[in-house]
Amino acid sequence: MDLRETAVSAMPKAAIRLFSGPYVAGDSLQAGIERAEHFAKQKVASSLDVLGEDAASPQDISEYIALYERLIDAITTNQLFRALPEPLRPSISLKPSSFVVAPKDENGMVISPGDIDWRSCEAAVETVVEYGAAQGIRMTIDMENHQWTDVTLDVHRHLFQKHGAMVGTVLQSRLFRTKDDVDQLPDGCRIRLCIGIYDEPETIALQDLHEMKNRMIPLARRMFEKNIVVEFATHEKWLINRFFSELVVPLHITPDRFETQTLLGVPRHKLINQLVSGEYFRNMPGVNGDTAALNTGIVHRLYVPFAEHWDKAIAYCRRRLIHSPNLFWTGFVNAPRVLYHSLFNK
């Protein structure tokens, strides 16, 4: 455990709240919608996520379902969002752990996986996905630690048969199994590809961050071969450069077959503006023919989480601060501003 991890693990909730201000939209559904509106005006898409994991009771699950349905309604009835082209409208991300009672230990591991009612989890997720798909809202089933990989992919496979690419899921490059998981994906589905944020044992996952990032390129190549829509999620400009120079341009991948994604709060404003305007591509060798459309810009989507109460955001924020040094220092720099806002802008 390094110094940053030790410090973050010991932080009280109030300190986590201060450090996390830049990359959580706020503590209400309206705060999430307003942040998505702000980005939409800049031609940047959003994926809204309700923070809150580890449902403790059936009532919690019912409340999460109702909250996601309200979120779907808020997106659907929003005039600004309705006027956008479909790829730029907000999508929604959700975690299976919000939809099943699955007690965990202090390390975040489900205590008795064999005793969990995974079928009820699938049914609850399906309720939300079907509600969103019926209104034309793209839904993404987020990936959690390795205990959730099989059930998440099973739920996605089932829902993809019903709703096609309106429902997507996530694969993490750090897991050794991911290459095989890509080969088992249904052709034409939609996948967010990232390194993953959960610590995993060395027996099942890479431990070196640079290896995890480099591995995203061959995984994305294989996805393109299977006609999968790739949501390439990274903050690393060098890796985004590789994605375009080694895959998109030489393979003649058109903009409807991918998008790039980053997290709310990570300072990548210049890069994002270059991607959505097309400036990034205008001097790139080989951008012509099938890929000429890159010159008019691509879809970039920001992951925009919010919580109805900050207590429900703490687990997410603590993970981000531990595993993302840049976020830690961004939070440190922004903490005074967030404190001022919390004291004087109620």
Image (cartoon, grey):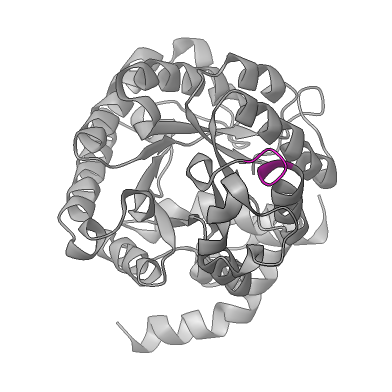
> In the image, is residue 249 part of the stretch drawn in magenta?
yes
Residue 228: x and y in percent read: 54, 29
Rendering coords of residue 335 (x, y %) = 56, 79
State which quadrant residue 42 falls in: bottom left
Quarter residue 4 falls in: bottom right
Res 117 seen here: no
Q: For the view shown, which residue lies furthest in the front direction?
A: 289
What kind of secondary structure does the magenta stretch mostly adopt?
loop
Eyeballing the image, is 326 above or below 152?
below
Measuring 44% from the left and 25% from the top, which residue is drawn there?
A: 102
Spot occupied by residue 315 in the image (x, y as percentages of width and height)? 52, 49
Q: At 48% from the left edge and 23% from the top edge, which residue is drawn?
A: 152
Can see residue 130? Answer: yes
Tally of marks: 0
Q: Nearer the viewer, residue 88 or 296?
A: 296
- Rendering coords of residue 244 (x, y %): 69, 50
Q: Is residue 312 left or right of residue 288?
A: left
Q: Residue at x 41, y 65 (%)?
A: 25
Position of 43 with respect to 214 (left or right) is left
Q: Which residue sits at x=57%, y=73%? A: 269
Nearer-the-camera pick, 55 or 170: 170
Q: Is residue 337 above or below residue 238?
A: below
**In the picture, which quadrant includes the C terminus?**
bottom left
Is 333 above or below relative to 112? Answer: below
* Residue at the far top in the pictured view: 114
What's the magenta region? 247-252
